[in-house]
Amino acid sequence: MSIQIPRGTQDILPGDVERWQYVEGKARQICKNYNYKEIRTPIFEHTDLFKRGVGDTTDIVQKEMYTFDDRGGRSITLRPEGTAAVVRSFVENKLYGLPDQPTKLYYIGPMFRYERPQSGRFRQFVQFGIEALGSADPAIDAEVITLAMDLYRSLGLKKLKLVINSLGDKDSRTAHRNALIQHFSPRIEEFCTDCQNRLEKNPLRILDCKKDRDHELMKLAPSILEYLNSDSKLYFEKVQQYLSDVGIEYSVDPGLVRGLDYYNHTAFEIMSDAEGFGAITTLSGGGRYNGLVQDIGGPETPGIGFALSIERLLLAIEAEKIELPVEASIDCYVVTLGELAKEKSVKIVNDIRKVGLSVEKDYLDKKVKAQFKAADRLGAKYVVVFGDDELSRNVVSVKNLQDGAQEEVEIDRLVLYLNDKILRS
């Protein structure tokens, strides 16, 4: 019996991986435009980091983490999300002491969650995210949201919906928490076990429950917007003003609470309205987390960020039938006839590669016709052809496969010739 790939994972093969590279390249370029620097953290961390950073009451910690004891008896978890690890690194490496603040970071890498695999959702998935640490200015909330929207638009997506909400400051959230407990307590036994456990620990997460979302108390639950104090209202108004100033359309949804414990003030989600995208429309989400750095052992430091799944982003691109301008061709293919030409081709191919051109040759002793077919399949722009006759005259034949033009070129001039032709094409 052959060994198969684990459930909930995928192989990204040549021909498809180029689309991933293009999308990731766009994300890196936009981060550069916004002055966000890349950070790379370990794929596994101590389990306590995610219990503190993500929250004991979240589904991620309670149900979805890949956790194991290492040989030293330490509890280790494959990272289920990126924020906690970035904040841990921010604290451990004292990035808050750098002169240029806020600290603006981004990451791209695999995350792991044990959940039911479905379209666009895997147990190992690639997440892109940004974190801005050190500023409590609502303008940076708008910047983070704008960066996300700019990424989607740069890839051609148009069927987008941005939803925002405010979870308020600590006082506002405490007042809302007490109102939720009072609202749900009399009939909490009608809700699922998870919601019953959340009532005292984090009642806000009841509003995020998928099992009980149609319960009548859900529709009547007190809105966080009713409990925002004056400072929180002003903060939220400024975020909305800045988004309007830069032409970002949005709607306010008081029911948007996000699934992680560390959010306060701004929360947001970006969804796809594309036909055929699927029942789960969320593309990305994020928000402000002013207490997270302290929870992980650092100084009082405000922060905001967002994350998205590359898998779901690619699904949205497919749903909108967008063709990414992925370069799948090579510059040149070397076709040889005869043993001496085959031997000489090794150096010729190497010389062409040294100037930064992409080139391939035959390694299977194919006939000339089959070598030309291979050049066509690879989308070669030029074919260099030579055999014993050409070598005796110190020339090769170069054919432009795009227009059919062909000419002989001295071997010593071949690299310069190809470089000039391809640079001008």
Image (tube, rainbow, N blue to C red):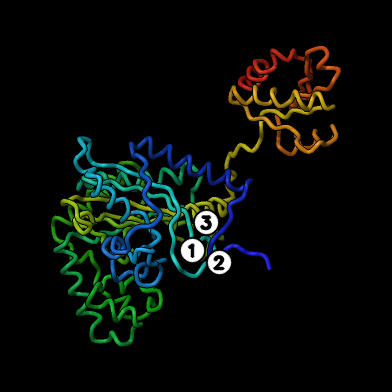
Q: Earlier in the sequence, mark 1 or mark 2?
A: 2
Under mark 3, the amino acid is Ala
The residue that label 2 is drawn on is 7
**Mark 1 to mark 2: distance in Å?**
8 Å
Q: CA distance from mark 1 to mark 3?
A: 24 Å
**Which amino acid, mark 1?**
Arg
Give the x, y percent position of residue 97. Answer: 19, 40
Q: Which mark is residue 274?
A: 3
Residue 317 seen in the figure: yes
222 to 284, vertically: above or below = below
Mark number, residue 277: none
Q: Tell me residue 265's x, y (percent).
A: 23, 57
Q: Secondary structure at mark 3?
A: loop
**Mark 1 neighbour class, 10 Å CA radius: few under 14, some 14 to 19, many 20 or more:** many
Check the picture and name the quadrant holding the C terminus. Answer: top right
Above or below, comparing residue 140 to residue 296 in the picture:
above
Q: Which residue is mark 1?
A: 123
Foreground label between 2 and 3 = 2
Under tag 1, what secondary structure? loop
Say which of marks 1 and 3 sits in front: 1
In the displayed structure image, the side of residue 158 where residue 207 appears, left or right: left
Taking depth in this image into account, of 109 and 136 the one nearest to the observer is 109
Which residue is rendered at x = 60% and y = 48% of the image? 16
